[in-house]
Amino acid sequence: MMAAASPSAEALHRDALVIDGLIALSDGYADGLLAGGVDAVNLTVAGYQADFAECCDDMAEWIERASRPEGPWRIVLAADDILAARREGKVGLVMGFQNMRPVEDKLHLKK
């Protein structure tokens, strides 16, 4: 059983900008993140062995998920998007990868 947080610790967490730097897998539900006061996440959005085409498909699913007005996600393209997600009661989604396989050997795709 976890001890209850002090009021000052709760206030610090509530006022802080909370970013989870690595979530390797997600089923798309964000209820736990929202309940925990997480403002944004760096989420691995493609499988570990995904090539470019698979990665594009996986990213498209997350973009579609985040485009739902009633959904809990907001795509993060700039730092201000994290603050906007927080204001909207959503989780900012930084799309990340575990390796560079999605770029394959085509370094021009990194732009």
Image (cartoon, rainbow, N blue to C red):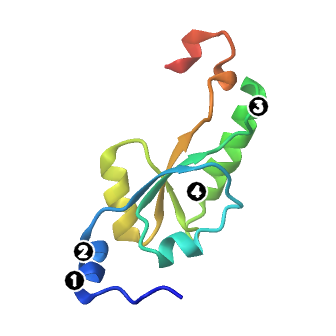
93 and 68: which is toward the camera: 93
Which element carries disc 3, helix, strand or loop?
loop
- Return the disc, 4 or 3, that comes first in the chain's sequence: 3
Which element carries disc 2, helix, strand or loop?
helix
Q: Is residue 76 left or right of residue 7?
A: right
Q: Residues within 10 Å of mark 2 (few under 14, many from 20)?
A: few
Q: In percent of the image, x 65 and y 52: which residue is there? A: 64
20 and 107: which is toward the camera: 20
Callout 2 touching callout 1 (CB < 8 Å): yes
Instruction: Please name the residue that numbered disc 4 is placed on.
Output: 67
Q: In percent of the image, x 53 and y 19: which residue is there? A: 110
Q: In percent of the image, x 35 and y 42: which residue is there? A: 78
Instruction: Please name the residue that numbered disc 1 is placed on.
Output: 8
Spatial distance from mark 4 to mark 3, Cα to Cα? Answer: 23 Å
Front: mark 4 or 3: 3
Instruction: Please name the residue that numbered disc 3 is placed on.
Output: 50
Residue type at mark 3 is: Ala
- Return the disc, 2 or 4, that comes first in the chain's sequence: 2
Spatial distance from mark 1 to mark 4, Cα to Cα? Answer: 36 Å
Q: In percent of the image, x 60 and y 63: which residue is there? A: 68
Q: Residues within 10 Å of mark 3 (few under 14, many from 20)?
A: many
Where residue 39 sits in the image (x, y, percent)? Answer: 40, 63
107 and 15: which is toward the camera: 15
**Quarter of the N terminus within the rendering:** bottom right
